[in-house]
Amino acid sequence: MMNYFQNLGKSLMLPVAVLPAAAILMGIGYWIDPDGWGSGNVAAAFLISAGSAILDYIPILFAVGVAIGMTKAKDGPAALSGLVGYLVITTVLSTDNVANLQQIDPENVNMAFGSIENVFIGIISGLISAAIYNRYSNVTLPDAFAFFSGKRLVPILTAVAMLIVSIVMLFVWPVLYSGLISFGTAFSNLGAVGAGLYGFFNRILIPTGLHHALNNVFWFDVAGINDIGNFWDGNGVKGVTGMYQAGFFPIMMFGLPAAALAMYHTAKTKRKKQAASLLMATAFASFFTGVTEPLEFSFMFLAPALYFVHAVLTGISLAIAAAFDWTAGFSFSAGLVDFVLSSQLPMANEPYMLLVQGLAFAVIYYFLFRFLIVKFNFKTPGREEEDSETAATETTAKTGDRFAVMAAQIYAGLGGDDNVSSVDNCATRLRVEVKDMDKVDQKGLKATGVPGINIVGKHNIQVIVGTQVQAVAEEVRKIRKQ
């Protein structure tokens, strides 16, 4: 079950990764025409409308992305099936069609059906189509129906399945929708405290990958909050819309890089060079793009108490930003790129104060992390116990293609062909299924220089590589084909 939710979290990253395109287009457009929102400049209107095209169809992106991510083959027909499933249920349960089914006036249809085109329905469509693909994509039908065998059968079965789901959702969706609205409203009514609690749980769930599910409630239109969409569309309340995003900027741009500096300064003298190469790269990724997992995983399991402190500080940051109505937004993550692009948006409110807040959090992170690391002797990067494997890795990494070398070392540490069943990757991690976890050389994996590893079950292990994970994953796949 945990592996299933891990895969779901990874799948949700695929559509989320598309959002920076909308951020760039709309950010530049609003920068050109911050007052008219495109009405006063043709170029701005062109860019803003192009970015809106992506944001308006986020549910479809989730339907397709989840369908691809949750299938074993990652095949095109899976994506098509996800789209088919989404189109079926959203058409059947549209307001006008529900009015016809219930033989009532459209004005009397439950308001829930006016919001049927949402991310939640997209995810359900993707999950159902993926399950059908995994089960029936290799089915062979009798000769008379042979044309519809295998992968061609999947979209047909998906359409039928979504008809059944539509009947169920005709009764369930109004109740479920009300529950989601109540959940979102409960947090909204808590104001800054609610934002702080969200920030805390967002970080706490990172190790499981389930933080994506939590993000969907607040960032997209699942529970009526839609913080990202409303912020970039300019639909909301200035100083309020963006409250579930703004507080991440001080942490990702300043706090975590400062924590990396503290870990470098507390590293053992002989290990400082090795620690610097890891911490500098991960700190830069956090500051510039807002991708924090490589840095967080470098100390998450080595010092879980330290990671808990980080989660608390994240919650405090979101609460402070929300309390003072300082807002900025992102489409991908809270790094410099999104900060610059969003700072001229209509919904941005005193975004420069987030930089001031960030400097304060940098000081807090640095001195608090440094104190705790030394006080409790946390084994953060550069403070691990010395072993012979580390030296061997450093020597090997000097020659040959670094991704190929790293991939070979990681694959050997996982047990090679005899032990590796499958290899996949998300934005920052290799996700590997192994036959026997006892055959995995955990010390050898750590010695490759990766930020960390995460064992999520008897047969599933994650190797946190960082933003270059795609290159490493491709090299691993080349090794498996040899």
Image (tube, rainbow, N blue to C red):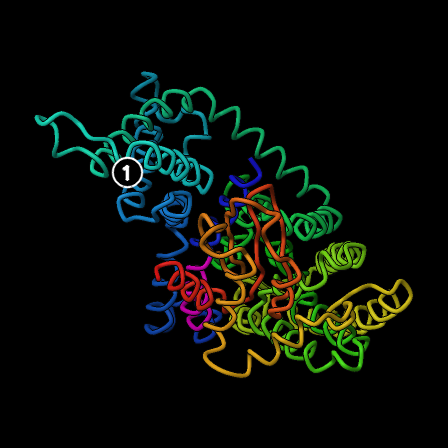
Under circle 1, the secondary element is: helix
Q: Is residue 325 left or right of residue 82?
A: right
If the image is split into quadrants, where does the N terminus sit? top right
Q: Which residues are magenta?
A: 17-29
Query: Is 18 a magenta residue?
Result: yes
Residue 107: image location, x then y, percent? 39, 26
Residue 95: image location, x then y, percent? 35, 30
Residue nearest the observer in this picture, 457 or 386: 386
Q: Is residue 85 left or right of residue 34?
A: left
Q: Main secondary structure of the magenta part?
A: helix
Q: Is residue 170 above or below residue 340?
A: above
Residue nearest the observer in this picture, 326 or 463: 463
Q: Residues within 10 Å of mark 1 (few under 14, many from 20)?
A: many
If the image is split into quadrants, where does the C terminus sit? bottom left
Query: Could you tell me which residue is drawn at 80 percent across and 72 percent down?
Result: 366
Residue 457: image location, x then y, percent? 60, 42
Amino acid on which the number 1 mark rests in the picture: Val
Q: Is residue 426 above or below residue 343?
A: above
Q: Is residue 385 above or below residue 119?
A: below
Q: Is residue 207 left or right of residue 146?
A: right
- Within the image, what quadrant is residue 52 found in? bottom left
Residue nearest the observer in this picture, 188 or 362: 362
Query: Could you tell me which residue is drawn at 35 percent across and 26 percent down?
Result: 106
Query: Could you tell me which residue is drawn at 62 percent across and 78 percent down?
Result: 394
Residue 323 visible (yes or no): no
Residue tagged 1: 84
Residue nearest the observer in this picture, 109 or 357: 357
Query: Could you tell me which residue is drawn at 55 percent across and 83 percent down?
Result: 398
Q: Is residue 200 above or below residue 389?
A: above
- Within the image, what quadrant is residue 224 found in? top right
Residue 379 visible (yes or no): yes
Q: Is residue 224 left or right of residue 247?
A: left
